[in-house]
Amino acid sequence: MKLLDGKICAESLVADVAVKVNGYIASGLRKPHMTVILVGDHAPSESYVKSKIVSCRKAGFDSALLRFPETVSESELLAAITAINADPSTDGLIVQLPVPQHINPQNIINAIAPEKDIDGFHPTNFGRMTLGQKAFRPATAYGICKLLQFYEITVKGKHCVVIGRSNIVGKPISIMLSNDFDIGNATVTLTHIETPRELLLDETRRADIIVVAVGIPGFVTEDMVKEGVVMIDVGINRLENGSLVGDVDFTRVSSKCSWITPVPGGVGRMTVAALMINTLMAYQNNFDLT
Ligand code: NAP
């Protein structure tokens, strides 16, 4: 078993971004700029936002964090997004999810200008990605593809099973792995909560690559996988003792895997790296750079 080390891969990708940014700055351009909106004091969100800001610094970007209280209204948030959309000094905008219950997340996503939507969640980007057109690709799914590419894992022609169909992970990764992309051309099965258990087992037991994003610790067990499977564990679950675990029973499953992502230090790091790549792309689009 070998580790798909998201930390090593992300550091390498962010360093590549920084080299490009240094070149642009040397030619007289301003730095790329990412703005993050954070609502409330959700502890995991605080930590995700912190790692995005740290990564911006490593990439040579400027960043701004706009905080709103838990009680902010949807219209106040939409007004802030409209203002950032119109501000030419911001290349990329993220609204850290989840937002409080009284705010409809889809209204928030829809309000972000597609050209600043570095999370790749806006219907324009999601649609373009689905059609195989140039777009900001959803960051976690894009990060997974970059990780597979970094470790030269063959995807073309493989049988991939995705567990979980969320708009931010399961759905986009199933589309990206099946599209005719640089990392793609796999045969993909997307499973979800209505997939009968026997069907799920049939699929996972013959999968070459499994991507799991359900948010249930230990969901993937040893009996569900074949020898040599490549396992991508997207889950981030905090246990009562404070430790972070994924959706895979790592101790028992990892010995059957050819490759596996650790949690932490796997997909999470890649999500942030993909955001840096998307922000660089937004900046390059702004300045007509190739
Ligand atoms: P989500 O929106 O809650 O979606 C979970 C998906 O899993 C849903 O599609 C659900 O099906 C499916 N599901 C639930 N129970 C299932 C079961 N028993 N069998 C098959 N499918 C089942 O979650 P998410 O946002 O995708 O996140 C999933 C996990 O990934 C969480 O732990 C989250 O923290 C983590 N995450 C990590 C990153 C990262 O950067 N590493 C990024 C995003 C999320 P239904 O649609 O039918 O309900």
Image (spheres, rainbow, N blue to C red):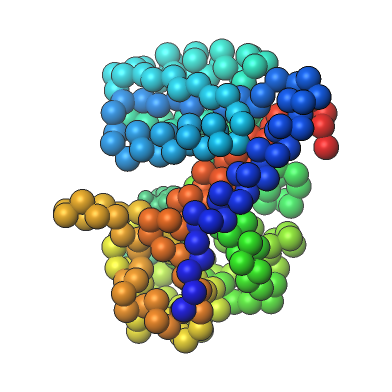
Q: Is residue 94 left or right of residue 250?
A: right
- Counting from the top left corner in percent of width and height, residue 11 is at 56, 49
Residue lying farthest to the left in this orientation? 241
Q: Is residue 234 left or right of residue 237?
A: right
Residue 108 at least partly seen: no
For the point 76% across and 21% down, the residue is 29
Q: How many marks?
A: 0
- Image: 142 above or below 112: below
Of residues 173 and 192, the one drawn nearer to the viewer in this rendering: 173
For the point 75% across and 44% down, the residue is 134
For the point 48% across and 50% down, the residue is 269
- Which image quadrant: the C terminus? top right
Of residues 72 and 244, the one drawn nearer to the viewer in this rendering: 244
- Image: 42 above or below 79: below
Q: Residue 16, located in which quarter of the rendered image? A: top right
For the point 66% across and 38% down, the residue is 18
